[in-house]
Image (spheres, rainbow, N blue to C red):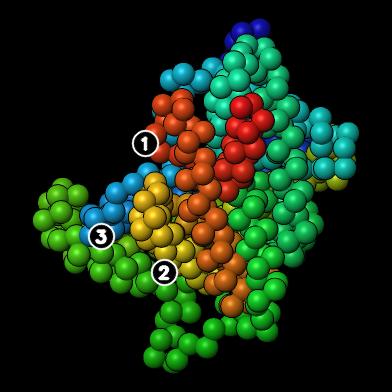
Amino acid sequence: MQAFFEFMLGILKEPAVMVGLIAFVGLSVQRVGISTLLKGTIKTVLGYLILGFGAGALIGALGNFSAVFTEAFSITGVVPNNEAIVAIAQKSFGYEMALIMFFAFIVNILLARFTPLKYIFLTGHHTMFMSMLVAVILSTANIKGVTLVVLGAVIVGSLMVIMPAIAQPYTKKVMQTDQLAMGHFSTLSYVISAFVASKVGNKSQSTEDLNVPKSLMFLRDTPVAIAVTMTVFFLIASLFAGRTFVEQLSNGQNWIVFTIIQSFIFAGGVYIVLQGVKMFIAEIVPAFKGISDKLVPNAKPALDCPMVFPYAPNAVLIGFLSSFAAGILVMGIQASMGWTVIVAGVVPHFFVGGASGVYGNTMGGLRGAIAGAFTQGIVISILPMLLLPVLSNLGFQATTFADSDFGVVGLLLGWIVS
């Protein structure tokens, strides 16, 4: 029994295996041939892994850019990073987190089966992050053992269907189908971006229809545009950081060469993510038909935020830049007011800001992408600051959760248990 339990925890901790298993079950209940079964299962796993490879390249390049940017402009403060704070908290709450995560997935399936909220949340790492947040905050109320796991699983499992449902009115417009949902705990960011865009935007001018002069037509190619843009930003930051620092960071590689290569790695990462998303969605949707028909009628897979990137690649870049600009602005305000400075984390501003740009573009074109992503950029710069006192009481002062839903849930739970 213990071996089986550990096996199931292992599946939940490895999202690629989990989505592959779901694809396998979905195709099996449709009684497809062995060839289709193997092809669909393997390509689902491969698509998810390819997405992960691209994300890894992105995060590596963004990490180097963030280090150079921080050095260039003498920025100090708290860096919001989900992985970092979970790694710190895992020493004290790792066991509780794993149990909450396991049972939250069961709660998710039950709620999808017996309520109108037909969403299966497949973004495993965000389930893990939310499970950790809930475990940490519930423990402040001296809730322990079975009670903590049961209560935590119910909370996280409920969020796994509620949050996709909140974003779905906008997500189905972005995806042009009601068969996919957003499974990423930045729901507030996407809803805010879409709402602001719908009020101030102009749908007639899409980010994908930008009028580019003939001499700059190469910028209509998304990977090329991203490579050029990041190279410019990276070079400016490197100039201010200084050759010595950059070459120390690059282990002796020429600072200009390092800057250009990192920018191109970033662009390549974006391209890989886009290809992985396309393959993943092409396989998981038909597989989910089996789950929908047999296990959870009308079930919708809730997927990670890069799923929207292929629908408006220009909006991804515009959303990132707008969100990051908002983060820089809020940093200045926080420093001038003597508040804790939340360093504009490049990774959350790229992924969340980029996806917010796509939502904003769908609801309000180019203007909507800029305004929507900028507004949510302010939100994800303020919420981590507000959440920090809740976590610092437990000794987690160095970092905090980055995404908007963690801030809202953390503050709400913190207020309840206090």
At 18% from the left and 56% from the top, the residue drawn is 246
Asked if 364 appears above or below 276 in the picture, the reply is: below
> Is 105 placed left or right of 411 in the picture?
right
Q: Nearer the viewer, residue 112 or 135?
A: 135
Q: Nearer the viewer, mark 2 or mark 1?
A: 1
- SS at mark 1? loop
Q: Earlier in the sequence, mark 3 or mark 2?
A: 3
Task: Please give the count of numbered marks on the rendered protein.
Answer: 3
Q: Nearer the viewer, residue 357 or 273?
A: 357
Labelled pair 1, 3 in contact (Cβ < 8 Å): no
Where does the image place residue 345, in percent across and percent down from the top left?
41, 52
At 64% from the left and 37% from the top, the residue drawn is 412
Label 3, on which residue?
73
Measured in 3D between alpha carbons, the distance from the residue under mark 2 to the one under mark 1, in whole angstroms, is 31 Å
Residue 237 placement: quadrant: bottom left
The residue sitting at the front extreme is 337
Amino acid type, residue under disc 2 in the picture: Ile
Label 2, on which residue?
226
Labelled pair 2, 1 in contact (Cβ < 8 Å): no
Asked if 399 appears above or below 90 in the picture, the reply is: below
Q: Which mark is residue 13?
A: none
Residue 29, visible in the rendered structure: no
Asked if 157 appears above or below 170 in the picture, the reply is: above
Amino acid type, residue under disc 3 in the picture: Phe
Label 1, on which residue?
398
Where does the image place residue 398, in percent across and percent down from the top left?
37, 36
Residue 331 placement: quadrant: bottom left
Where does the image place residue 163, in percent across and percent down from the top left?
71, 45
Q: Nearer the viewer, residue 51 or 303?
A: 303
The residue sitting at the top extreme is 1
Measured in 3D between alpha carbons, the distance from the residue under mark 3 to the one under mark 2, in whole angstroms, is 23 Å
